[in-house]
Image (spheres, rainbow, N blue to C red):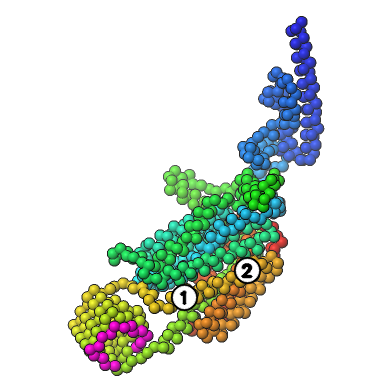
Amino acid sequence: MEETYKDRTSLVKGAKDIAKEVKRQAVKKVNKAVDKAQDGYTQRSYNRFQDEEDDDDYYVQGGNYGVEANDDEGSSEATEGHDEDDEIYEGEYQGIPNMGQGKDGMVALGQPMCDEYKDRHELETERKADEEELAQQYELIIQECGHGRFQWALFFVLGMALMADGVEVFVVGFVLPSAETDMCIPNSGSGWLGDIVYLGMMVGAFFWGGLADKVGRRQSLLICMSVNGFFAFLSSFVQGYGFFLFCRLFSGFGIGGAVPTVFSYFSEVLAREKRGEHLSWLCMFWMIGGIYASAMAWAIIPHYGWSFSMGSAYQFHSWRVFVIVCALPCVSSVVALTFMPESPRFLLEVGKHDEAWMILKQIHDTNMRARGQPEKVFTVNRIKTPKQIDELIEIESDTGTWYRRCFVRIRTELYGIWLTFMRCFNYPVKDNTIKLTAVWFTLSFGYYGLSVWFPDVIKHLQSDEYASRVKHFHNEEVSHFVFNFTLENQIHSNGEYINDRFIMMKFKSVTFEDSLFKNCVFEDITSLNTYFRNCTFVNTTFYNTDLEPYKFVNSELINCTFFHIRTGCQISFDDDYSAYWIYFVNFLGTLAVLPGNIVSALLMDRIGRLTMLGGSMVLSGISCFFLWFGTSESMMIGMLCLYNGLTISAWNSLDVITVELYPTDRRATGFGFLNALCKAAAVLGNLIFGSLVGITKAIPILLASTVLVCGGLVGLRLPDTRTQVLM
């Protein structure tokens, strides 16, 4: 009886379970019918339809059918409505929304065509639609994340990288005279250092900008800043001029990627209403880099005592200490960048949804904790990712060796960068690229050209004033006299010096012409810009002097003796006022940028980028005409400060417009191309304006004014991006 009762109880219980399952399946069928109508026979609908046909198998696999039932009904209710589409996927335990549902790749009647059956035009059309949807959604997500501690931390980290770029530009001009003198560079090779650095920056801007669109903003910036820091440090220790040029070339190549990558990186974590203002504040770090370089040059380079030597082969002078100090911002940025995440906008662009979602959640949580609202939850569950289009790249079969594989990989990456660059000239960004090219070239040509011309004109005025104070001595006869004081800025003609002693003295810009030195002694002599032309030396002794043969021009030496002649180039900043003056002028010119930076940051989002760009360039062009009145050093310095203060607003607005006009997949590449063009225009401007120093003022003034005004008018034709989201 007991066994019969148990069997009956089991039967009743089984019947109840079957009834529950039938009811649940009926509800599922109704829900799935609604889902089919809403989804239009999507992949998810098809998978559920398959589940209905395989219900028997499903329950066998799930372990619910043919297995002893649970005593309580909670277990069956807990799993009610759960099917195999709701499986836990990798990363769900971290709270990442599942983007892989309903993508089994199965084909059904009425389902959209698979990607392999579509041509490239259709895929690109779909991707463009996805990117437009992502742009709108991403703007809302960034607004939800807020602007706070994360953006400010990234602001200072990227600011250090931008500061390193500003330092690199100024290092060239400050180190050039000392390095060329220390390494005994003739005048024929004296201009290579400045040109080689700009060449490296030009190539680096294009390469690293393109790489940032391939591997990511953070990764590209880390590599390029590391290259710059390594070769900058190395250049401070090398002795040969050729190796020094090589190091500065690769140092410039590394730092060339800073500007396009930094602005692309930072713009992608800013909301629309914050973008113009905070990108303008970021530009201030370039000014800080110039001030830092000027101050360090002023404090370090003239101190010739800050040096040591290891024999005659190794000399470490103060300008090398200055090079090391100037590499510190670069090193600081590399260390800080290791703690920052990748741009989430870039990750979404390349289809890495989960990583982007986690970084956006990190931004949100960081800002909310800083606001005192740690309980506020990140509400975004799904982010649109653009359709990924695979690039078909032909790879040679002979890739067995490691160097062959490296070559193929490098060639593939370079080809990818080139394809991305060519897309900058496709619709709809083609017109914008052409206009930006004109604006970048004209602004760079006018700014860098006059920036070189101003200091050269000031030095030319100084040399003219110095030459006007030269003292002339004719037909002097001096005998049995001891010269132990400094002779400076003098010309001695047709003199006779008999039995005289020149001991422990300095000759600075002194010239002896058609003079006779008989039974004289030159001992412990230091000379700078000193020459003996058509002179005669009889029974004269030279001991521990730097009077090398090239300083005796068409002179005759009869029975003369030389002991311990110091050869090579001698650096001396004692009583050298011009060195301090150059650093001070650059310091003032860079500091004059501060008011323009503040004004542009405060007004960028109020009056608009185009008004700021066009107005600043036109006013800069008009200000060039004030150079007619620059007849003294103080007036030229004032004109330099005015010019720099006006042009900085154009630079800031141009950086913001460039970032906002290019879509994410071409943003860094387009910016890198334009920044490379900027460096090419700078070199051209340096050559043209530098050749006109001391010849005429009319051509530089008219040329700079024309290009700046024309560039400003072209800039006004660009589309206004103030109210647009990042594409």
Name the residue located 66 percent from the left edge and 67 percent from the top edge: 602
The percent coordinates of residue 293 (x first, y second) are 48, 67
Q: Is residue 225 visible?
A: no
Mark 1 residue element = helix
Name the residue located 73 percent from the left edge and 20 percent from the top edge: 71
Whole-number angstrom distance, CA of label 2 to CA of label 1: 26 Å
Residue 482 painted magenta: yes
Q: Quadrant of the C terminus?
A: bottom right
Observer-nearest residue: 26 or 421?
26
695 relative to 528 in the view: left or right: right
Observer-nearest residue: 472 or 668?
472
Tell me the magenta residue range: 476-491
Look at mark 1 in the image and give the residue it sits on.
Answer: 582
Say few, some or many: other residues with alpha carbon within 10 Å of mark 1 (under 14 / 14 to 19 / 20 or more). some
The percent coordinates of residue 299 (x first, y second) are 44, 70
Observer-nearest residue: 502 or 533?
502
Q: Quadrant of residue 537?
A: bottom left
> Farthest top residue?
1
Look at mark 2 in the image and give the residue it sits on.
Answer: 598
Q: Is residue 285 visible?
A: yes
Name the residue located 28 percent from the left edge and 64 percent from the top edge: 311
Q: Quadrant of residue 701?
A: bottom right
Amino acid type of the residue tagged 2 in the rendering:
Ile
Say few, some or many: other residues with alpha carbon within 10 Å of mark 2 (under 14 / 14 to 19 / 20 or more). some
> Farthest front residue?
372
Q: Quadrant of the N terminus?
A: top right
Q: Compared to 20, does 1 lie above or below?
A: above
Name the residue located 26 percent from the left edge and 85 percent from the top edge: 482
Mark 2 residue element = helix
